Image (cartoon, helix red, strand yellow):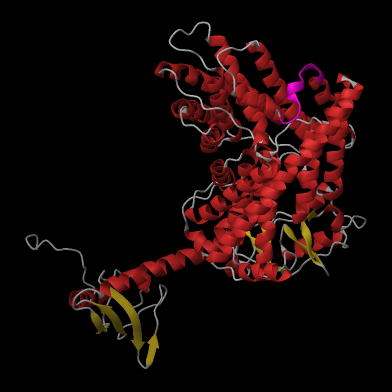
Amino acid sequence: MASFWARIRGALRKRGAAAFLIASLTVGVLVGIAAAALFLLVGWFADIAGAVGDAWGSWASLVIVPLGLFLAWLIARRFAPEIESGGVTETMVGLSLHGGYLPTRTIGPKVAATAITLGTGGSGGREGPAVMIGGAIGSSLARYTRFGEDQVRSLIAAGAGAGVGASFNAPIAGMLFALEVLLQNFAVRHLNAVVIASVAAAVTTQSIVGEERILTAPPHRLEDPAELLLYALLGLAAVAFGVMFLKILDQVAQLRNRAAFPDWVRPLVMGGVVGLIGLLESDALGTGQDFVAGLLRLATERDDAWWALVLVAIAKMFTNALTRSGGGSGGTFMPSLFVGASIGAALAIIVEDVWSFSDIDPGAFAVVGMAATFAVVGRAPLTAILIVFEITGDYGLVLPLMLATSLATFLGDRLQPASAYTMPLKRRGIHLLKREDIDLLDTITVGEVMKWPGAVVGPSMSTAEADRVLSAERHHGMPVVDDAGLQGVITVSDIARAGGPSDDVTVGAVMTSRPITVTPTMPVSAALARMAALGFGRLPVVSESSPTELVGMFRRESVVRAYHHALGASTGRHLYRDRIRQRTQPGASFYEVPVPHASPIGGQRVRDIKWPEAATLVSIRRQARVIIPHGNTVLEAEDVITAFGTADSRVELAYVLEGQSLDPVDDEAT
């Protein structure tokens, strides 16, 4: 067995195309196992909580839910603070700002915190945590095999997409989620890894937990084209409730930041409120998967009142927001499907008594409402449509799905530009940029324009000493380094926030620890996007092999230097293409033309002279010296110019050197 894994490691470390596909498959299998473990652990904790509830009665939720959130908060506080809340946002940050680094140490705590949160009644979904777990697995394997950054991004997206695919047994939806939400890029180079990992994860999870534990629904179909009017109305309802959900998530998160009580009290207080809501509406607790499955299987008869479904949808919004802000680990993916299915079924119940064109199928409206609401909350319309196809296994609702989802996405973008995944970033002042087509700065690497760090400060220095170093170096910020390597970044603003320069306050106490870094091989465009997203004016440059080995600083002036460098290279490529074009013209050759003694171009710079388009200046011979010309080279009388071009360009060049214009002349006028 040891020799088998040794061969696998050897194949992966070759880092070829085959090794990359093997890595993708390995990521998928590992994510599938992790997703299955999450399924089983959530069920195990739910059984324990159910047994306690049976013994204590319905009031047990007032104790069990706060206790679950407190334990999840404690795990995050002790092992990995980033595992609080969902997981998709943290994965996006790792991809965009940390060069694809998601710590391996988050995997176990994230599984445990999510299982405890959801198993004890905390409101959320497994899918967001599965994205983070899958992304961390992909990142860890990529670092272990030392793939390049672009392949690291692919493997993280593959792991994250596999997490979604495994949760719903929907590998195509998982693939689209990774491309649409995380990478925001449908580049073909990422596709193979994401597809392989998503399929492998879905198959692995289903094999372990069985299909009965995964959300499924019977096929539905469009009974009459006139129903499209109702589905358009459902799209509008999805916008209203989706935007409401986003507002509640945002307001509760801000309430958390304004709360005056100690941090450890937060999970108990918010968990208590969730438990209280659960007393009134128990379906608003947990993942809500069984409730959604029931709505998707509805026939034309339905006993529930429409207003009861609306109330449970609103209750789910609050319980999910409170769970996330209370320190629990749960995503918004499943809650948004819960809200959408409830609203869709409610609308069907409202209209079935007045609609006479066809029979109304509440299950079909629940399916479409589910997709439309997630399109608003997650801003991922393609994922929303495809996940419904895979859950139902049928394409009978393709027209209602496309109509309601596209309408919901269009209006949702205008009413609430941020999604559930980008709102937390916006509150932290992070604005991730979408990378479009390649620009000039894609052609220059950070290593070409970075500067050596020069002076640095240590964490044990006082802020007064650091302020003097900053003033002497004329910088607003610089790296903090000790014997272990890069520890953080100290800025003038950090010192000001600490009360100004002081001999009693150390740099280590006020610096920004675990700073965002870049590497020498990263394109300047990517580093600039990272800098712009955070609003920083400088980023430490670290070695490819060690994230704490400082090798330079990338500052705002580096961007200007990179632009001029790229512009020069671009101009050089343009001139090279011109030379190639000239060399393919008939009769092109090298020739020499002397500058006449009384030439008016004597004393002019090369850049100021209008040269013939079909001629390329090669060199200037000045007495016994040969000069390679550039734009600032000044011509002198009796210089001999060597050029390459056609016979016609030689005549034109002679005219130029004699001071005659190359512009067309009207013979009649002369």
Q: Residue 59: which quarter of the image?
A: top right
**Residue farthest along the bottom direction in this orientation:** 624
Between 444 and 138, the one lying in front of the other is 138
Q: Is residue 470 above or below residue 336?
A: below
Between 286 and 178, the one lying in front of the other is 286
Between 475 and 357, the one lying in front of the other is 357
Q: Is residue 265 above or below residue 488?
A: above
Q: Residue 169: which quarter of the image?
A: top right
Q: Is residue 601 visible?
A: no
The percent coordinates of residue 574 (x first, y second) are 37, 67
Which residue is found at the position 35% from the left and 79% from the top? 635
Q: Is residue 521 above or below residue 48?
A: below
Between 374 and 393, the one lying in front of the other is 393
Check residue 283 for magenta coloring.
yes
Which residue is found at the position 54% from the left and 65% from the top? 18
The percent coordinates of residue 15 (x first, y second) are 59, 68
The percent coordinates of residue 530 (x first, y second) are 62, 53
Quadrant placement of the N terminus: bottom right
Q: Which residues are magenta?
A: 279-287
Quadrant placement of the C terminus: bottom left
**How many numbered marks, from 0 up?**
0
**Residue farthest along the right direction in this orientation:** 504
Q: Is residue 487 above or below residue 586?
A: above
Q: Is residue 114 left or right of residue 379?
A: right
The percent coordinates of residue 254 (x first, y second) are 75, 32
Q: Is residue 112 left or right of residue 26?
A: right
Q: Is residue 496 visible?
A: yes
**Residue farthest along the left direction in this orientation:** 668
